[in-house]
Image (spheres, grey):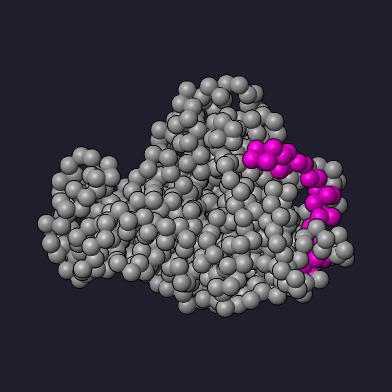
Amino acid sequence: MSPNASTTTAELFDRMHARSLSDPDGFWAEAAKDISWYKPWDKVLDDGSAPFYRWFTGGELNTCYNAVDRHVEGGRGAQAAIIYDSPVTGTVQTITYAELQDQVARFAGALRAQGVEKGDRVLLYMPMIPQSLVAMLACARLGAVHSVVFGGFAPHELATRIDDAKPKAIVSASCGIEPNRIVKYKPMLDAAIEQSSHKPASIIIWQRPQETATLIAGRDVDWAEAAERAEPAECVAVKATDPLYILYTSGTTGQPKGVVRDNGGHAVALRWTMTNIYGVKPGEVYWAASDVGWVVGHSYIVYAPLLTGCTTVVFEGKPVGTPDPGTFWRVIEQHKVGTLFTAPTAFRAIKREDPDANFLKKYDLSHFRALFLAGERSDPDTLHWAEDNLKVPVIDHWWQTETGWAISGNPLGVHLFPIKYGSATRPMPGWDVRVLNAELKEVPRGDIGAICVKLPLPPGTLPTLWNADERFKKSYLADYPGYYQTGDAGFIDDDGYVYVMARTDDIINVAGHRLSTGAMEEVLSSHKDVAECAVIGVADDLKGQVPLGFVCLKAGVTRPHEEIVREVVQLVREQIGPVADFKRALVVDRLPKTRSGKILRGTMQKIADSQDYKMPATIDDPGILPEIADALKTLGYATSSSLPA
């Protein structure tokens, strides 16, 4: 359903959306024509095991073939598939589709030589280098299931994922590179394997020139040597409903949630989004400035651009400091990027360093067409700044690890709707978005409630959690039967625009990374002097939110508070990792609670952010709230008196 110039209208989009809900079989069967299949499907939407819906059952394909080999066969072998731009190492490298095909086939052969076959899991612990994409695609080539863990995660978090996925092999690099330091991956990986119950059979290491990892004889394998001697592997046909990857998302530290993505629906949906949501054509340069450890990296650094035959940019750097706030503009000019997708955090950082956009004026961005923002709510100031200086559409869109692609957005490839600041615009085709109250009834337009999606979810979304069907139902389907519970609260206005206002659970959003405050509380409570604790997300100009901890000490503890705070901060860093940005904690005498014992985190957050709040009807002791406000003021929060409204 690719639009043409004469029919690119709001009416066309409305028809597309309506058809996707009334005739999902016809709509998605048409979209599936853009994917190559070894065997056609028996059924587009299979609701035989609802609420476990499946797409394209009976069909067979290979995602790697669709992302790489078919483009070589179709004449794109000499086109750039990957542009690797690494200001932290001073490297720019181009890999053509033909070169990528060779590298992926050889590394798939190296995995096979280590015993990896269809259905096996392979855990990847990698930095932002082309080898990360090669490893993901090699797994897909074999029909193995990859699980990428962000390189910044600490050994404990890595160990929980090893135990849950039970990988036959782990693929890693000797190091990651930050602007001012080298992060050695191998010691963290070795520590994680030491902690985990499951022991993978082999570890394959890409040795980077900046750091040579010590390999353990009999277990560890040098990537380059293994690939050189490997027999190149062919693409293995898998079922559309077979898993492509597992991606872990927010859960407690002891029980990660493994979001499963299938092969068929995933390929169809992502290919469709490139044309219709992002307005990108085969052969164009597309850049998602994210990390392969997050869902944006999976969907829009790796799979969607390559499924479409685009050139994807792999960027190893930061929006500022590598070397300056003009880095993004340099990359866009140098590589002729047409579309950029990044988090609002990146633009807040650039804006803070270069408020007058002086660095932007040094570069020719005449070919640049659109900026897409997601990962957190885009504040109007940042959107205005980007629009005023880039002079292209700046599009906020909303989605989640679980969904794999946009729930709501502005479909640039079909029709650009007027932008309303603070809104992620309209639900995309396939998404029947409703706002419900506690009685499971739709609320009037403009009223806030729980944002839910009427089942079935469209292709490309999670069919379940890894080895946890009951947890999938409990986490997403139980509270609103017949709906997927997004965990976000907000409203839909009279024009059908979706406004996402807040999380309805305890997940906070730090620079686009969803992190569980519950996981952090679990770490704090493990400290020997801590009797009780709470973690909230407080507003931050750069990162959107940052975590702030409150700890109540055990009776008889007389050690200096500063010492205990330093220790709990270090504990979170060790057990969850620097990505949590946990740097702030307060020692308080007591925490505000309801009479049933629930800590009033939402009220504490409002006090910290100097927002008006209502005295909770169920509060046990209202006198605790002024104590919390006084403590917060010592860290520069609660700057205005936010008395109960």
**Image height check: is 474 above or below 127?**
below
- State whether residue 177 appears in this view: yes
Residue drawn at the location 79% of the way across and 70% of the way down: 112
Residue sitting at 15 percent across and 46 percent down? 643
Relative to 58, is 510 on the left or the right?
left
Q: Is residue 413 visible?
A: no
Q: Is residue 466 magenta?
A: no
- The image shows residue 491 at horizontal and vertical percentages of 35, 50
What stretch of residues is rendered in magenta? 83-112
Q: Residue at x 72, y 42 (%)?
A: 83
Residue 27 is left or right of residue 401, and the answer is right
How many numbered callouts?
0
Residue 105 lies in the magenta-colored region? yes
| Residue that lies at the very extreme toward the front in this rendered image | 559
Q: Which of 321 and 341 lies nearest the eye of the viewer?
A: 321
The residue lying toward the viewer, choosing from 612 and 263, is 612
Q: Position of residue 394 (x, y in %)?
A: 51, 35
Q: Answer with left or right where residue 624 lies relative to residue 567.
A: left
Asked if 146 appears above or below 86 in the picture, the reply is below
**Position in image of residue 233 (x %, y %):** 84, 65
- Which of these two is toward me, 448 or 519? 519
